[in-house]
Image (cartoon, rainbow, N blue to C red):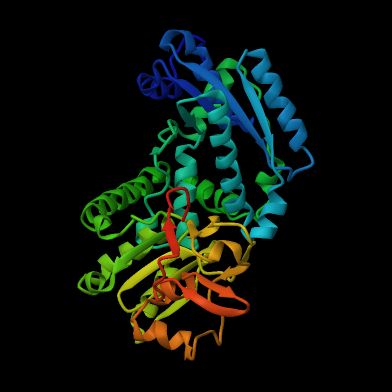
């Protein structure tokens, strides 16, 4: 390799540098070949393009060599005078508690750490070193997992504050760059573990296809680009139908949803769920089946989310919105916040001096002589509204119910702006 030759890696990344002029960049730095090459190139061109490079390493505490990788990244950044931070996160424990796959859980933890580091460095953008090979592998992973056609668009080049400037760069081009500048990189020994689907696909499918039909990746990328076009075409038409006014709930009017074509319905269900968890075709099928029910019903979905079909709306929300809870208001207190659902009660008259219990409904609840369930149904309140309505008890008797009772001495305010779906 001629030292002065400009490589395709350099040409492709150079074309992206105009987007970074004058900005503070935070590179997600694992120490592997992809992120090392990205960090090295950016630092090499830092003075020319007037941006500042920073790096964040996330130690997943998963491998015995994870601390070595952390030190390796720290040493490289120190040598290149790159501001560096390392975040340690017990990803195995997080995945166990949240009942997530390691890859999914690690991704959630990693991006949380990166966004925190972004704030600390006052950075403008997060850069990750995803490559063309990552995109193709993701296509096969989604296909094997039973993803819908709307998931085949793969990895986005820009997603909010995250940019991926290497999506058009292959592994071969990266090795060529590393060889030219004699750059060392860390090797993740779990890359050989085929219990991870990405490793199995890389070792047994994409590598074999590269030998059998060189350049096949471009055909896969063509399919994924078609998925992007399909997503944009349908999305521009349908996304406005989703009500996002409540930041903790996504909803669609039943009458609007019922008037759509089947593929439009599937798209909306997929889009709603894709905002909060990894969607598979089976999830869309489960939700579609629920919509056909004659009753108000709901199902559990991954990561604690629930989908509900009620008389007027289809809703997607986290179960914490309707999980059972109970709070005590002490005597002498005139306000009570219920932060996990974004509500606050204010009391006047005789209520501030009384000890009260605030909760949501329970089986068998009665308001005076009537079953609370029957009152809710007679008022045609949706299932979600019933389960999220506040109930106030005094001396073990229900004295006030949200959406039912009228009492000028008890007022309710709702502010969900800071709540996440």
Viewer-proximal residue among 415 and 222: 415
Marks counted in the figure total 0
Residue 356 at least partly seen: yes
27 and 129: which is toward the camera: 27
Seen from the viewer's position, the closer of residues 280 and 420 is: 420
Please say if 36 is above or below 235: above
- Residue at 55% in and 19% down: 40
Residue 268: x and y in percent read 31, 63
- Quadrant assignment, res 121: top right
Percent across and percent down for residue 81 are 62, 12
Q: Measured from the top left, where is residue 29 in percent x and y?
A: 60, 30
The answer to whether residue 63 is left or right of residue 12 is right
Residue at 35% over, 47% down: 219
125 on left or right of 323:
left
- Which residue is at a point 75% across and 43% down the rendered structure image? 63
Residue found farthest to the bottom = 369
The image quarter containing residue 239 is bottom left
Do we see residue 185 in this rendering? no
Residue lying at the far front of the rendered structure: 349
Horizontal and vertical percent position of residue 82:
60, 17
């Amino acid at each position: 390799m001629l030292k002065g030759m400009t490589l395709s890696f350099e040409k492709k990344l150079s074309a992206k540098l105009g987007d970074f002029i004058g900005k503070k960049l935070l590179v997600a730095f694992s120490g592997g070949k992809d992120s090392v090459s990205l960090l090295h190139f950016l630092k090499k061109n830092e003075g020319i393009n007037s941006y500042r490079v920073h790096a964040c390493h996330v130690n997943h505490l998963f491998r015995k060599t994870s601390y070595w990788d952390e030190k390796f990244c720290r040493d490289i950044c120190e040598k290149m005078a790159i501001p560096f931070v390392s975040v340690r996160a017990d990803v195995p424990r997080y995945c166990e508690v949240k009942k997530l796959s390691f890859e999914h859980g690690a991704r959630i933890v990693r991006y949380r750490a990166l966004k925190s580091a972004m704030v600390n460095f006052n950075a403008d953008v997060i850069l990750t070193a995803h490559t063309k090979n990552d995109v193709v592998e993701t296509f096969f992973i989604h296909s094997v997992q039973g993803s819908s056609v709307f998931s085949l668009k793969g990895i986005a080049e820009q997603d909010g504050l995250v940019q991926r400037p290497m999506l058009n760069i292959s592994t071969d081009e990266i090795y060529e760059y590393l060889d030219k500048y004699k750059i060392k990189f860390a090797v993740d020994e779990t890359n050989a573990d085929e219990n991870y689907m990405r490793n199995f696909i890389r070792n047994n499918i994409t590598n074999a296809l590269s030998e059998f039909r060189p350049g096949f990746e471009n055909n896969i990328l063509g399919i994924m680009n078609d998925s992007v076009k399909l997503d944009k075409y349908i999305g521009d038409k349908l996304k406005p139908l989703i009500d996002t006014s409540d930041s903790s709930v996504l909803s669609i009017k039943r009458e609007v949803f019922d008037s759509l074509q089947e593929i439009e319905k599937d798209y909306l269900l997929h889009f709603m769920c894709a905002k909060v968890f990894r969607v598979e075709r089976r999830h869309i099928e489960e939700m579609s089946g629920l919509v056909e029910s004659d009753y108000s019903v709901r199902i559990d979905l991954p990561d604690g989310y629930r989908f509900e079909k009620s008389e007027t709306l289809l809703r997607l929300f986290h179960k914490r919105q309707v999980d059972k809870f109970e709070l005590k208001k002490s005597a002498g207190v005139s306000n009570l916040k219920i932060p996990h659902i974004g509500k606050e009660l204010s009391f006047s008259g005789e209520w501030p001096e009384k000890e009260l219990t605030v909760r949501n409904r329970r089986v068998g609840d009665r308001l005076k002589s009537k079953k609370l369930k029957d009152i809710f149904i007679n008022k045609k309140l949706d299932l979600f509204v019933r389960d999220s309505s506040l109930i106030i008890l005094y001396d073990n008797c229900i004295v006030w119910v949200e959406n039912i009772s009228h009492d000028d001495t008890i007022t309710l305010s709702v502010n969900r702006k800071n709540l996440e779906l």
